[in-house]
Image (cartoon, coloured by chain):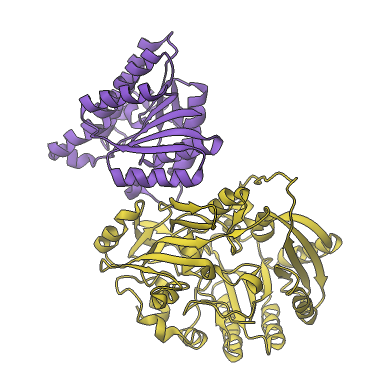
């Protein structure tokens, strides 16, 4: 049985990834969340879907480096981890970030600092074990700062640069690092921008692509794939053009 | 504000949409947002799931299973779980939902709130007959656990109650043991309504599923009678067909006066040639249209109505023929037309649709504005005379009179309504 650890397991994308994995074959799943009850709800669901899998849920403070390090070491010690998926995040209100610096700080901590702490913790224990894939969810928003959500974009950009460095460091080792960049996806995080026109990708579609991308060990996964092209164009736009666009 | 459609795609309703994702948060959200209505997959055809300029609570995110007992077949899950997901998970384990409607792409909550029925109604009743309990969140903060054996009046109001008694958060469902998804199905052409009734009467005791397709434009009411029984075919692999999708709303309705007649005739003669026994999966027998996602786009930008009525059996031959004549004279209707007899069991809910031993006729009509509505008025009069009723899950335009006469337990129902919940349908038919 594959052993998979999911950080931020109540996130919609993470949950659908878990459903994909257990649908393929029974797995040994460790779900880590901020909220004990909600994480356990996800675990209960997965146990009904796959009675042969073992699913445990645990709660942790996402900004506590000591405990994060401890968790990574303990879980690796229990049994070798095949995949760690770091999936948590919040979409802050950009205009509020500009005036309410507490909100701004929170957004940066949860979306940037926390994923880095988890990644560093698990990278060390996986490197020691000489085995495993570390998958981190970034965002297309991290590819270029835009006025409509640059605080979130900056946090995700930090994650992207971090993942790049980690890939560089672990190149040539058996440990794989995968950076996932979903486009806008239909999740609770984007509930306020949900419309029925179908502009948002479904979490289950995105999850399917993430799971298959992790299997293949791709270094960067844009999902849905069209975002690779869209973001390439966005990155290439000269500043004098970009600054006139309302995005 | 986002534009929300029901399945008929008649007119979108701009609504303030709130997604429900955590069962623990439902009570808090619905107390905070102001008056709304739960909206699952938006598969009801008319306005039961719409709330223009007001709040809708989207329940599709409440899609967690909670508990499964392999020994007893009892499943507890959140109300946003799709019937299809239950079937696909449980059929390989030897269990399935006893009742599914013509589409499995509906939520458990929607199936309860509309007390949906299937092609096996004469054997197994409707969806609510297999629900052992629901958790209902009310907008005043109350949480009510009800079922057939506890707080049963709340349960009777909620089953078939089109979402108006509270938001269904979880449900406890009794599944049924099955050998697999396979059915042995038989297709028998019939040439008039009288023959349909003979076939229905002859089939009900020995066949678990019965339904018929009727050519709504034919002179005598020809059609195809389909009946099926579960069959043990363990050697066959369970597979799920690929879904195709209608990619956009067609600029004009695919179903129109030019296409309908030849289409119906072609279908009848094609199927007539294939009459006899065959093996089908429950998905393809019960829900053939589920393989074509968003098929409602075929009706073009104006959308369509589904008119589904039930009338008592005593005078049904006459009543159905009167309705057929009106439809034929109007030259309207669609390829999708279904005639079925219900079983003798009275439904549980105060507002449940099936009438014991009733005969139900369901037809799609492309929306042609006034001419379609005028036809419905004539059909409503026939249903009213016959002592029948219109299915709320399909309804977009019946009159309040017909609603009141068709649902004699309405008074009992009203005292269970949640004052903080209303829909376009409830305002149209019940005043608020």
Q: Is residue A175 above or below residue B57?
A: above
Could you tell me which residue is drawn at 68 percent across and 86 percent down?
B316
* Horizontal side, residue B92 vs residue B136: left or right: right
Q: Position of residue B311 (x, y in %)?
A: 62, 84
> Which chain is the one coloured yellow?
B
Could you tell me which residue is drawn at 50 percent across and 45 percent down?
A49
Q: Is residue A100 above or below residue B304?
A: above
Figure colour of chain A: purple
Query: Where on the picture, by quarter, is residue A245?
Result: top left
Is residue B247 something that shows in the picture?
Answer: no
Q: Residue furthest right?
A: B273
Q: Residue furthest bottom?
A: B385
Give the mark count.
0
Q: In this view, does A221 lie above or below B13?
A: above
Could you tell me which residue is drawn at 49 percent across and 28 percent down?
A2
Is residue B387 something that shows in the picture?
Answer: yes
Query: Which image quarter is the C terminus of chain A in?
Result: top left
Q: Residue furthest top?
A: A172
* Horizontal side, residue B256 vs residue A11: left or right: right
Query: Where on the picture, by quarter, is residue A184?
Result: top left
Q: Where is residue A208 in the image (x, y as percent from the top left)?
A: 50, 35
Q: Position of residue B29 (x, y in %)?
A: 28, 58
Q: Observer-nearest residue: B227 or A154? A: B227
């Amino acid at each position: 049985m594959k052993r998979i650890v999911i950080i931020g397991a109540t996130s919609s994308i993470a949950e659908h990834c878990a459903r994909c994995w257990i649908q393929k074959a029974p797995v040994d799943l460790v779900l880590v969340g901020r909220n004990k009850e909600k994480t356990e709800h996800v675990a209960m669901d997965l146990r009904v879907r796959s009675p042969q899998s073992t699913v445990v849920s645990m709660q942790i403070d996402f900004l506590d480096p000591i405990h994060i390090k401890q968790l990574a070491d303990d879980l690796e010690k229990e049994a070798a981890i095949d995949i760690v998926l770091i999936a948590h995040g919040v979409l802050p209100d950009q205009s509020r970030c500009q005036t309410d610096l507490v909100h701004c700080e929170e957004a940066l901590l949860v979306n940037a600092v926390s994923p880095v702490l988890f990644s560093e913790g698990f990278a060390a224990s996986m490197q020691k074990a000489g085995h495993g894939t570390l998958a981190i969810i970034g965002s297309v928003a991290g590819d270029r700062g835009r006025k409509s959500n640059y605080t979130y974009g900056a946090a995700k950009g930090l994650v992207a640069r971090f993942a790049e460095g980690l890939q560089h460091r672990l190149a040539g080792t058996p440990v794989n690092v995968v950076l996932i960049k979903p486009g806008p996806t239909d999740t609770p995080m984007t509930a306020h921008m949900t419309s029925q026109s179908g502009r948002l990708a479904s979490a289950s579609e995105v999850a399917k692509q993430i799971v298959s991308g992790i299997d293949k060990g791709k270094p960067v996964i844009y999902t849905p794939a069209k975002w690779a092209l869209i973001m390439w164009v966005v990155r290439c736009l000269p500043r004098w053009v970009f600054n006139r666009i309302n995005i | 504000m986002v534009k929300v459609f029901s399945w008929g795609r008649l007119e979108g309703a701009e609504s303030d949409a709130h997604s429900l994702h955590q069962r623990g948060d439902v009570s808090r959200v619905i107390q905070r947002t102001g008056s709304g209505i739960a909206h699952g997959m938006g598969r009801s055809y008319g306005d039961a799931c719409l709330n223009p300029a007001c709040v809708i609570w989207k329940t599709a995110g409440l899609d967690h299973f909670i508990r499964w007992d392999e020994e007893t077949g009892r499943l507890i899950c959140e109300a946003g779980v799709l019937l299809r997901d239950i079937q696909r998970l449980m059929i390989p384990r030897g269990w399935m939902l006893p009742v599914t409607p013509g589409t499995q792409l509906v939520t458990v909550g929607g199936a309860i709130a509309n007390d949906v029925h299937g092609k096996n109604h004469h054997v197994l009743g409707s969806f609510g007959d297999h629900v052992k309990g629901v958790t209902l969140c009310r907008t005043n903060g109350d949480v009510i656990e009800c079922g057939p054996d506890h707080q049963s009046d709340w349960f009777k109001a909620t089953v078939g109650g089109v979402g108006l008694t509270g938001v269904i958060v979880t449900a406890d469902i009794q599944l049924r043991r099955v050998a697999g998804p396979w059915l042995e199905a038989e297709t028998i052409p019939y040439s008039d309504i009288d023959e349909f009734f003979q076939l229905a009467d002859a089939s009900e005791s020995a066949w678990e599923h019965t339904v018929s397709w009727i050519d709504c434009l034919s002179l005598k009411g020809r059609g195809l009678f389909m009946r099926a029984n579960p069959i043990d075919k363990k050697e066959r692999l369970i597979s799920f067909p690929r879904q195709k999708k209608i990619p956009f709303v067609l600029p004009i309705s695919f179903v129109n006066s030019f296409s309908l007649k030849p289409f119906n005739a072609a279908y009848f003669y094609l199927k007539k040639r294939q009459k006899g026994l065959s093996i089908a999966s429950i998905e393809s027998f019960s829900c053939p249209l589920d393989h074509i996602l968003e098929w409602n786009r075929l009706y073009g930008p104006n959308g369509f109505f589904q008119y589904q009525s039930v009338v008592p059996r005593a005078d049904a031959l006459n009543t159905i023929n009167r309705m057929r004549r009106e439809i034929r004279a109007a030259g309207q209707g669609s390829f999708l037309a279904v005639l079925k007899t219900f079983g003798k069991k009275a439904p549980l809910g105060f507002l449940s649709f099936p009438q014991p031993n009733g005969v139900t006729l369901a037809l799609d009509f492309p929306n042609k504005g006034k001419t379609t509505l005028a036809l419905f008025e004539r059909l409503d009069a026939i249903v009213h005379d016959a002592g029948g009723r219109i299915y709320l899950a399909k309804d977009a335009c019946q009159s309040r009179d017909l609603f009141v006469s068709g649902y004699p337990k309405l008074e009992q129902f009203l005292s269970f309504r949640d004052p903080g919940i209303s829909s376009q349908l409830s305002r149209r038919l019940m005043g608020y």
